């Protein structure tokens, strides 16, 4: 049976006119948004308690009879808890949730993963290999320049006919300065442009650009536009030169 | 190399140039899924996890010859995977112009952008709870909860005492439980 508000107030006034005369005000406050999603919070809470309850219900027969003995033996043996035992103790709800899959992986992702990684490694290796010879060549070139300069200096000393012992001593003395790559680098840095130029003049095998231009027949060379429109233009030109030279032999 | 060999055998084969790649492939196949999931739980999306996983294995290739065999290959790999993931997250944080106080790496946003994300499902609330943890505590929780790693090994991976790890895991689990109840 339902009563409306005025009936209830009238009833109270008959019992206690004082209380019936006081205005009804709610003195308690509720946090903002408390009722928003309250149903979900309660459901989650109920769910988690149910999980806990279920866990507790699964107690084997005689579990408590031997519990103290097992605890004592555990303390003696100091057997560490497994991860599953531990999370069951700390939070049975989290133990329950663990099996729920969340993230997905593209199909067959793991099938050729090792091949893809090895491909990347090979690619990186190849890049490194292509740089090394250049670096080595530079070192050899630098060493050759210094050795050449040292030799030329020694020959100049030799030409002055100052004695073989003196020549050998000065040669060894200079050579000993460049025994490590660091010293070699320092040696290169200390060389003047004139010294290097003099050395190259005497020993250099660089192509003579004038001679190269003079010996090349440029009349049959493809034009610049040919290179842009036909990527085989240069190959065709070189093939034609080769066939000509073969015929003349 | 038809069956999975033990780590010691694989390391021996890796030292021999004629079986080096075979051994390395076997190491990848043996640990790829465990390490992938460890990384994925830290960086959240698949593409990032794939990048980090491949880069970490490239580093393994370079470092395996100098691997000190007094430690376990398994913990060494986890250590590299953890460091690579943390480095990746740090780089992302640097690149990001948005500063988020609770979730500095935007990991919660990444979770929400997952096509399967459902804020009402408990399993996603669990993931949100995990992302609400501080970085180190999150790693400890993941390693223990998902990988079921013994504290002794975790101690080697994270260079932290077993006692501190146990306390950290306990606090993390309770924080996540509270997060689920209050969200």
Image (tube, rainbow, N blue to C red):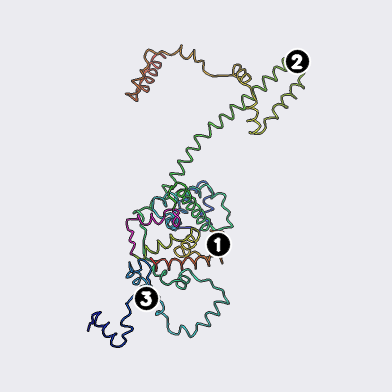
Same-chain status of marks 1 and 3: no
Quarter occupied by residue A99: bottom left
Q: Quadrant of the C terminus of chain A?
A: top left
Q: Is residue B30 visible?
A: no
List the residue tagged with mark 2: A161
**Do the residues bearing badges 3 and 2 touch, measured as CB atoms within 8 Å?**
no
* Place of residue B37 in the rendered image (x, y in percent of width and height, measured from the top left): 42, 57
Q: Please give the label number shown on residue B155.
A: 1
Q: Please give the label number shown on residue A50.
A: 3
| Residue plotted at (54% across, 73% down) | A79
* Place of residue A1 in the rendered image (x, y in percent of width and height, measured from the top left): 22, 84
Q: Is residue B134 left or right of residue A241?
A: right
Q: Residues within 10 Å of mark 2 (few under 14, many from 20)?
A: few
- The span from disc 3 to disc 2 (Cα, nearest Å) is 107 Å
Magenta: main secondary structure equals loop
Disc 3 on helix, strand or loop?
helix
Count of all numbered marks drawn on residues in the image: 3
Q: Chain of mark 1?
A: B
Same-chain status of marks 2 and 1: no
Q: Nearer the viewer, mark 3 or mark 2?
A: 3
Q: Is residue A3 left or right of residue A141?
A: left
Q: Is residue A15 above or below residue A238?
A: below
Quick one: which residue is furthest to the left in this view?
Answer: A1
Stretch of the chain drawn in magenta: B100-120
Mark 3 / mark 2, whichever is N-terminal = 3
Q: Between residues A135 and B168, which one lies in front from this camera angle? A: B168
Disc 1 on helix, strand or loop?
helix
* Place of residue B26 in the rendered image (x, y in percent of width and height, measured from the top left): 46, 53
Q: Is residue A22 above or below residue A207?
A: below
- The span from disc 1 to disc 3 (Cα, nearest Å) is 35 Å
Q: Residues within 10 Å of mark 1 (few under 14, many from 20)?
A: some
Same-chain status of marks 3 and 2: yes
């Amino acid at each position: 049976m339902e009563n409306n508000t005025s009936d209830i107030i009238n009833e109270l006034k008959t019992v206690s006119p004082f209380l019936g005369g006081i205005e009804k005000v709610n003195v308690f406050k509720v946090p903002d948004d408390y009722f928003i999603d309250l149903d979900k919070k309660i459901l989650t809470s109920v769910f988690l308690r149910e999980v806990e309850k279920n866990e507790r219900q699964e107690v084997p027969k005689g579990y408590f009879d031997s519990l103290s003995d097992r605890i004592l033996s555990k303390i003696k043996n100091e057997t560490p808890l497994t991860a599953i035992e531990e999370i069951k103790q700390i939070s049975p709800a989290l133990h329950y949730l663990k099996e729920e899959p969340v993230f997905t992986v593209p199909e067959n992702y793991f099938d050729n993963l090792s091949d893809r990684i090895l491909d990347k490694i090979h690619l990186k290796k190849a890049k490194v290999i292509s740089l090394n010879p250049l670096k080595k060549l530079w070192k050899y070139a630098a060493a050759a320049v210094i050795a050449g300069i040292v030799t030329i200096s020694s020959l100049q000393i030799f030409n002055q006919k100052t004695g073989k012992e003196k020549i050998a001593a000065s040669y060894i003395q200079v050579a000993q300065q460049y025994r490590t790559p660091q010293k070699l680098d320092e040696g290169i840095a200390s060389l003047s442009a004139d010294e290097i130029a003099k050395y190259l003049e005497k020993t250099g095998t660089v192509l003579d650009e004038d001679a190269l231009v003079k010996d090349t027949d440029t009349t049959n060379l493809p034009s610049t536009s040919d290179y842009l429109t036909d990527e085989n233009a240069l190959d065709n030109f070189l093939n034609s030169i080769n066939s000509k030279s073969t015929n003349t032999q | 190399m038809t069956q999975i060999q033990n780590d010691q055998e694989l390391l021996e084969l890796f030292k021999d140039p004629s079986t080096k790649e075979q051994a390395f492939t076997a190491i990848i196949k043996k640990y790829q899924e465990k390490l992938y999931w460890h990384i994925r739980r830290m960086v959240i999306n698949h593409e990032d996890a794939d990048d980090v996983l491949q880069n970490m294995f490239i580093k393994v290739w370079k470092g395996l010859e100098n691997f000190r065999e007094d430690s376990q290959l398994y913990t060494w790999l986890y250590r590299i995977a953890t460091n690579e993931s943390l480095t990746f997250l740090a780089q992302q944080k640097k690149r990001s112009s948005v500063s988020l106080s609770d979730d500095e790496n935007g990991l919660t946003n990444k979770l929400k952008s997952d096509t399967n994300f459902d804020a009402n499902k408990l399993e996603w609330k669990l993931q949100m709870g995990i992302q609400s943890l501080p970085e180190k505590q999150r790693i400890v929780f993941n390693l223990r909860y998902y990988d079921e790693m013994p504290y002794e090994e975790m101690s080697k991976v994270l260079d932290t005492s077993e006692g501190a790890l146990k306390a950290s895991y306990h606090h993390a689990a309770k924080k996540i439980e509270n997060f689920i109840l209050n969200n």
